[in-house]
């Protein structure tokens, strides 16, 4: 079933993902990407192990700020250090880590429900 009609107009929709990148609202991104409801951009990170609080500066500075950040960790789910989760949570953003495919699907569903959600995605 096509869920795209359920997404409010002007919102970023994750249309496709694969080993090299993502297609978001008709734009191809090679490599990691940050997807906010209003815009998407390349995400300059070296990999899951290199994530720091600064990796999420764009999400923390967003207005309106997302209440939930889905982190797509690649082909497999990985554990994020609790200190990093807590540092981002101090700004009012809850992080949920899942494999990238699940993060893409979950983002689209939550966006369709009108939730304030963002996704930080590493290629699968």
Image (cartoon, helix red, strand yellow):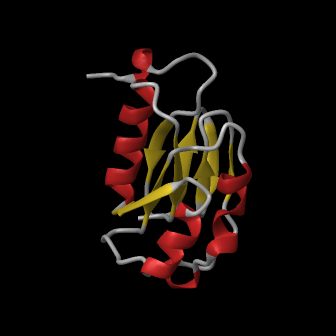
What's the residue at 60%, 63% (across, down)?
A: 31
Q: Nearer the viewer, residue 121 or 62?
A: 62
Residue 108 versus residue 113 in the image, above or below:
below
Residue 7 horizontal side relative to residue 92, left or right: left
Identify whether 111 is placed above or below 124. above
Q: Which residue appears at 40% of the width and 68% of the height? A: 74
Which quadrant of the figure contains the C terminus?
bottom left
In the rendered image, the residue lying farthest to the front is: 90
Q: Residue at the bottom extreme?
A: 49
Q: Position of residue 111 (x, y in %)?
A: 46, 31
The image quadrant where one finds the N terminus is top left
Residue 89, horizontal then vertical, whole percent = 53, 62
| Image side of residue 44 versus residue 51, left or right | right
Q: Say which of 115 and 86 sits in front.
A: 86
Residue 39 percent location from the top left of the image? 68, 38
- Residue at (67%, 37%) from the top-left corner? 64
Q: Is residue 102 above or below residue 113?
A: below
- The percent coordinates of residue 86 (x first, y second) are 50, 71
Q: Which residue is drawn at the image coordinates 44% and 81% (left, top)?
A: 81
What count of labels does the image hold? 0
Relative placement, left or right, of 13 versus 27 is: left
Residue 16 lies left or right of residue 65; in this view the side is left
- Quadrant location of residue 21? bottom right
């Amino acid at each position: 079933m096509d869920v795209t009609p359920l997404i409010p107009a002007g919102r970023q929709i994750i249309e496709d993902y694969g080993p090299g990148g993502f297609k978001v609202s008709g734009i191809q991104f090679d490599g990691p990407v940050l997807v906010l409801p209003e815009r998407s951009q390349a995400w300059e990170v070296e990999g899951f192990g290199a994530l720091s609080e600064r990796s999420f500066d764009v999400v923390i500075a967003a207005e309106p700020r997302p209440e939930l950040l889905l982190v797509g960790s690649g082909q497999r789910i990985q554990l994020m250090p609790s200190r990093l989760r807590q540092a981002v949570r101090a700004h009012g953003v809850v992080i949920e880590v899942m494999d990238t495919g699940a993060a893409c699907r979950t983002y689209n569903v939550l966006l369709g429900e009108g939730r304030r959600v963002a996704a930080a995605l590493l290629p699968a």
